[in-house]
Each structure stands twice: as structure tokens, then as C-alpha cells.
Image (cartoon, rainbow, N blue to C red):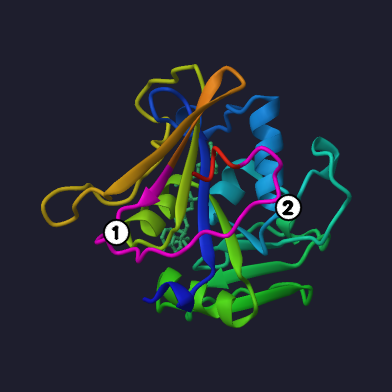
Amino acid sequence: MSPTDRPEVIVNCAVSADGRLAYAGGKRAHLSGPDDLARVQWLRADVDGILVGIGTVLADDPSLRVHWELIDRPKGRTPARIVVDSNGRTPEGARVLDGSAPTILAVAERAERVFPPTVQVVRSGVERVDLTKLFAELQRRGMRKLLVEGGGEILASVLHAGLFDRLTVYVAPVTIGGESAPAMVRGPDAGPERPAVPMVFVSAEPIDDGVLLTYLPRSGSQAPARPLSGSSRPDDSKASG
Ligand SMILES: NC(=O)c1ccc[n+]([C@@H]2O[C@H](COP(=O)([O-])OP(=O)(O)OC[C@H]3O[C@@H](n4cnc5c(N)ncnc54)[C@H](OP(=O)(O)O)[C@@H]3O)[C@@H](O)[C@H]2O)c1
């Protein structure tokens, strides 16, 4: 897939120092401090869409809105919320279905669920959403910049398919441990048939009590190099490399 066939994709998440996205069983962990939370709002304010998997909706019930009150910026346009949900399992009462922002449910072709008219439905993939086709469709609908926030299964698919242009990981100064706390990247095991995802380290920036790591896809991996657009966050120059 050519980088021009999809929006610019920024992947962002917060993990513990032992690489966990959440507490045992996927219970939400508030890993970011105030400065990192504000950084994420700057990121959200800068994109056309914010994407998560259905696992995140079921676990966290996120609003996926820009919290303008956390950043010193006048309220701007509202990015679309995109949920990758092959079988239409998003609960009726989920915050992403509250009608307060444009919402896209990305489902598989076989999904039968009917959503409220305020929701746009994009179909791709027979049994599971095909992210390459989904991203191409989002581009066709005018999205230029997409923020992927998780969770671990979506990150696995996006990173392994090379469908990203920048990865930022806030590493909080805590460990979570245990057997059931989800790792940052889930999906099938890596090995000779599914090699690790090669990346280029860009920067490590202290933020709150933790560190923000920035990586780019390594050219020659599946993700073709593309110039990154700027961010309007005032102090983003370090983070974007
Ligand atoms: N710390 C952070 O920054 C952060 C951010 C977000 C989430 N989280 C945590 O992450 C956890 C949820 O992560 P998760 O891994 O369980 O779920 P997830 O990645 O949010 O969603 C995974 C689901 O997406 C659907 N999906 C459809 N097409 C897919 C594809 N091509 N590739 C991958 N998934 C696809 C699958 O369900 P179907 O087959 O039904 O479609 C899959 O089970 C929660 O504990 C949440 O708290 C943490």
C-alpha cells in the first residue's frame, strides 16, 4: 500500500515500565500524568480521526473526544471517532454512540448489527475488519491524519502491517506485572514467520515522571517512508523528531 493510499497514521499509547497497557484483565490504568494527558489532547486536536478497537470500547468506554479544557487552545473542529468492531459488538449505551461527535463503526462485511443513523458504517474484510482497506476508505472520505490509540490487538495489526508513520509511547514510572495485564502489542506471536517490527528510535523526552519515546518505521519495513506533517502543539518539535 502506498503511503498516499491512506491517511498519515500516528500511533500513541501509554504503558507501564514493564510494557503493560492496563491492569489485570484489561482494567483501565491511568498511566499518563497531566503533561502527557495534555500532549494527547494536542494530538487529538490535530487529527481528523481517533481510532480504537472494540476491546478498548468494551474495557474503557472512552469518549474519544478532545478535552479542550486541558489545553490552551480555542475549541476547534471535532475529529471523528472510529471503532474497529467486526461484528458490531459496540454496546448501545457506549459513549462513542452518544451522538456528540461524528462516529464511524468499521465492521466486517458480514456484520448484521444496525446502528443509529448518526453513525456511519464502513464495511471491509469478510469476517474481520481489513485495516488496509479501512484506512484507504478513510482517506477517500477526506481524512488526512489519523490517531490510533489502541488497544493491544489493534496496535499489533497496525504495526505489523506497517500501517503507521510515527509511534509515540509514554512510559510511566510504574510496573504492573501479573499474568493477565495486556501487553502493549498483542496479536499472534512474533518469530521467523512473523518477524519483529523494525523501527528507528527518534527521541526520548522526559515528561511528567516518565518518558515519551518516539519511533518511526524503519524504511525497508512494510511502511514506506513519508514526510510527517507538523503538529500545532507548541513544544512538539522534540517529540516529532
Ligand atoms: N494505555 C493505553 O494507552 C491504552 C489505550 C487503549 C486501550 N488500552 C487498553 O487496551 C485494552 C484493550 O485492548 P485489546 O487488545 O483487548 O482490544 P483492542 O485492540 O482495543 O480491540 C481488539 C479487537 O478489535 C477487533 N478487530 C477487528 N479487526 C481487527 C484487526 N484487523 N486487527 C485487530 N483487531 C481487530 C477484534 O474484535 P472483533 O473480532 O470482534 O472485531 C479485536 O478483538 C484495554 O485493557 C484498554 O484499557 C490502553
Q: Does the residue labelled 1 lie within 8 Å of ligand 1?
A: no
Relative depth, front residue between 72 and 70: 72
Q: What stretch is highlighted in magenta?
A: 215-236
Task: Give the numbered dot on residue 31.
Answer: none
131 horizontally vs 238: left or right: left
Q: Is 78 placed above or below 57 here?
A: below
Residue pointed to by mark 1: 219
At a point 60% along the width and 64% down the height, the residue shown is: 145
- The x, y position of residue 160, in whole percent, is 31, 57
At a point 51% along the width and 60% down the height, the residue shown is: 9
Tell me, yes or no, whether the two marked residues, 2 and 1, touch with CB atoms within 8 Å. no
Picture quadrant of residue 36: top right
Q: Is 152 placed above or below 25 here?
A: below
At a point 43% along the width and 65% down the height, the residue shown is: 226
**Dominant SS in magenta:** loop
- The x, y position of residue 91, in whole percent, is 66, 57
Residue pointed to by mark 2: 45
Please name the amino acid that badge 2 sits on. Answer: Ala
